[in-house]
Amino acid sequence: MRASQFLISTLKEAPADAEVTSHKLMMRAGMIKKLGAGIYTYMPMGLRVIRKVESIVREEMDRAGAVECTMPVIQPAELWQETGRFEKMGPELLRIRDRHERDFVVQPTSEEVVTDIARQELRSYKQLPKNLYQVQTKFRDERRPRFGLMRGREFIMKDAYSFDRDPAAAKKSYETMAGAYRRIFDRFGLRYRAVAADSGAIGGDLSEEFQVIAATGEDAIVYCPQSEYAANMEKAEALAPQGPRPAAKQALQKVPTPGKATCEEVAELLKVPLATTVKSIVLATDKLDEKGAPVSTRLWLLLLRGDHGMNEIKAGKVPGLDAGFRFATTGEIEQHFGTRPGYLGPIGLREPVTVIADREVAVMADWICGANEEDFHIAGVNWGRDLPEPALVADLRNVVEGDPSPDGKGPLAIERGIEVGHIFYLGTKYSKAMNATFLDEDGKPKVFEMGCYGIGITRLPAAAIEQNHDERGIIWPDALAPFTVVVCPIGMDRSADVKAAAEKLHDELVAAGVEVLLDDRGERPGAMFADWELIGVPHRVVISDRGLKEGQLEYQHRRDAAATKVAAGEIAAFVKGRLAAA
Amino acid sequence: MRASQFLISTLKEAPADAEVTSHKLMMRAGMIKKLGAGIYTYMPMGLRVIRKVESIVREEMDRAGAVECTMPVIQPAELWQETGRFEKMGPELLRIRDRHERDFVVQPTSEEVVTDIARQELRSYKQLPKNLYQVQTKFRDERRPRFGLMRGREFIMKDAYSFDRDPAAAKKSYETMAGAYRRIFDRFGLRYRAVAADSGAIGGDLSEEFQVIAATGEDAIVYCPQSEYAANMEKAEALAPQGPRPAAKQALQKVPTPGKATCEEVAELLKVPLATTVKSIVLATDKLDEKGAPVSTRLWLLLLRGDHGMNEIKAGKVPGLDAGFRFATTGEIEQHFGTRPGYLGPIGLREPVTVIADREVAVMADWICGANEEDFHIAGVNWGRDLPEPALVADLRNVVEGDPSPDGKGPLAIERGIEVGHIFYLGTKYSKAMNATFLDEDGKPKVFEMGCYGIGITRLPAAAIEQNHDERGIIWPDALAPFTVVVCPIGMDRSADVKAAAEKLHDELVAAGVEVLLDDRGERPGAMFADWELIGVPHRVVISDRGLKEGQLEYQHRRDAAATKVAAGEIAAFVKGRLAAA
């Protein structure tokens, strides 16, 4: 490919609305072009990267026995009404009326359509297991789309759906996909982690996220460097502390803490470690009548150590909170506690509240909490002596660096990641709602056990850039690069030798199946090199008159600090060697 | 690939709403699945065919120097308002409002978006010519979607757009695309014709349709078997007749024709050739005021020979009609002619009407037309003698078989086709409307000269089937087949020899890069053969115990009447030879 035939369009400055590195670099490198909020044209340079992603994903899905189909972008509302998602999904589901005033949606995923296919086409257990996938345009009408391809509205996703006879077979299908995903992410050439994820309301514990490691990632990933343990923050268990609760040493004491409404402020004022303070978080659950109107409300007081963060997913699993909860209003808090947030605690409540202590808080002695009186806290608090043992003890907090790994193999570490894949054992959620059955060996109809498996095809390049870039631009792994090699001739329009050598190298690499681009635009060396460092082509060869006279050409990998001199006659072989070694 | 891993789903009967052969066969072969009116899932078997089409199209577009990008499916209304298409396009343009009540469209094509890209990215004449293409999902909200993929609402189209400095360069880009299209359609292995098409209001005569020849095609294609001439019916010129008008022989005579309101009925009643009658078609043009309200109306009387059909495209080019016309209402006709349609003619009008004679009518003598009196016609009519020479003479009719070819190389023939590609020199229609300019060599801004080039990716398989099928099912050309070879073992579950031989052949063909499917479903031979004949895989090998014992296996091409015996040891080489010869 010659640059003059291609569309290269780099920018010195990223547009003002580009906040994150990958968005800035993709805009500057001319890979994407904004058409509207969260809606981008994939420009030729960006599309080549997306095609690489698609191609690796397809190869590994096919190898794992999945079968590709394509479900429509615009889907009639009827199937979405069968599962209730047409009504239940929020405004991020883009709804359309056609010319005949019939309702449609633009697909954000395709569970309904694929389950409809299965209930019609997969009639016998003999046809199972079956895994259908597509690589298709999706739309989610995000309220605040941002970060370029990281959180767009229109995007491309690979979504796969497995259908099985029973949970054991479904788990096998799930494991097959987990293996395929590992191969896919290995082939991308990215540092990633497969982390256990919470499987939500559906139950079971088979859910993993594939996270590309990047300091700028939205998600916190918890792992044990000494073992295989890895989970996302929502899922990672904080083990119960070892050993018994220490004996009480201090007397209960009400201390003035004027204007100190946070644990940090109180600890600083009293000159005690933050870990001796306990924070109070008040949740509410509503009992509703048949029409959905609230009949009664119950309040819950969650106690966490002052230096710990609440984990809402874990809180949502506590019996009583597992049907849904909300944060209490200031009015509700004042009614029950007699004071405003910042001075709350479990002692001396006006109205009954159910106390749930985090595992860590349950074994604390001599702790500090709010006095339920503005500008006062209580110190030297002890369970049993000053207040009843907590009604419930549960894991309510996010783990922190150094917490023991749940597998007992050492302390936990935390790093940041970008979720680009998610695999999920669905069970019968959709097949039951849509009465999707097959005839089992015993001649009886059974609902399918399902799994679903997604990869954010257009998000992946953005994640790859967050992980692989420097101040000059993108650094693509070979597997994702829009071009693997760029040949940069200097003064090609002036020197017939340079032109001939550049074209010879280009043609030789093309013949070897290498995706090479010859930059024949006639740019000055500085601008030309800056373009390719921005675009991030991993391998570069510079061909100059002086180099040819000296018989030495310059090869440089995008990560190399300096160029390597290579004998002119050896350059094609040298490049091929570098590609093979990559 | 093994059949058990794939999703094969054939039907004995096509659904009732499938009217045309390709729709019936694609449904029966399990290639597509209806989700809603004009909206289909591309099932695995059908998607493989679509991918073949896409892949050939991409290879030839790239070879022709076009560059691929992907423009969004959901496009903001603003650009569509710039060209006025947001308002002007009818209800087939699917309009959407997002959660913020902003207007969007689902793209039916992408002229606006690509012109917006060009005006931002192509700033200098040095970047031209440039041709950007995409293979992308489109939506047209057809009032009455039908015929499966032939006239669906959601479909995949390849659309390309060229940008050039001037008309000469744009015509060169157009010719490059015309060449690429010929290579594409040659590679599909279909009988097709590139026919000149009308370029509509934009002007110029550079527009060609690529028509797949099929008896069931919607379009009439006109061609000259003795030359390269080919055009669609709208475009094909009916030459002016040779020689002068014959002298008048008959006297003018009013004849009673009670209840005979068509030329056919009159000719039968009077026992004269249909070609001696003249039909009257009344058109109207309205003069509008600034607000679009009609100020005055002018009527036009078109005269065509009784056996000829009116060509509305040609009528729309007559001066006076070229700003748009409509058919006159019965009220308007009665006011001007004093009688109802069926008895109209150019003699004895109540109100003035402009007479336009078809070229053929202009040289007729002694003809028959309506008397402007119910139940009467006039015979022996002659120009000059009985009425003034016509105000205008023009080509108003469709050509018929045997008409002279416009290139003078012989008589015309007519066959039917299905339009699957269209190339078009657009000129500056969009670039002017959107003020899309580049800086030319003289430093001055100029608007781009554009072309657009479409291929109906998902329509092509349907057209291929209309052309290639028999009573048993589809017959794919090798280039489009979902699988090129099917290996059909008989009793694979009972015979280890059959199993081993089938797997060996399968593996050998896979190793040679052949897309082969091994039917391991355990179907009975009759059902198995019927499936593959329906699906239309071109090459089939049957492996049976008896065959193996005799050392003879059966090869059959889908078009062969009977199987060919091939020595068992030679079968792989034989199949490869047949594929190479195809």
Image (tube, coloured by chain):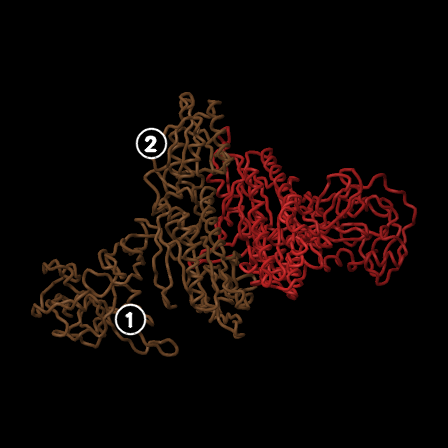
Chain colours: A brown, B red
Q: Which of the marked residues, 1 or 2, is nearer the chain's N terminus?
A: 1
Residue type highlighted by circle 2: Ala
Q: Is residue A368 left or right of residue A567?
A: left
Location of residue B86 in the rendering, given as x and y in whole percent from the top left corner: 53, 52
Location of residue B23 in the rendering, given as x and y in whole percent from the top left corner: 64, 59
Can residue A255 be spotted in the picture? yes
Furthest residue toward front: B549
Q: Which mark is residue A318?
A: 1
Residue type highlighted by circle 1: Val
Vertical position of residue B378 compared to residue A202: above or below: above
Q: Is residue B456 left or right of residue A164?
A: right
Quadrant (top left/top right/bottom left/bottom right) for the N terminus of chain B: bottom right
Can residue A135 be spotted in the picture? no
Residue depicted at 57% across the width and 46% down the height: B512
Q: Is residue B132 left or right of residue A564?
A: right
Q: Residues within 10 Å of mark 2 (few under 14, many from 20)?
A: few
Which element type, helix, strand or loop, lies under badge 1? Answer: loop
The disc numbered 1 marks a residue on which chain? A
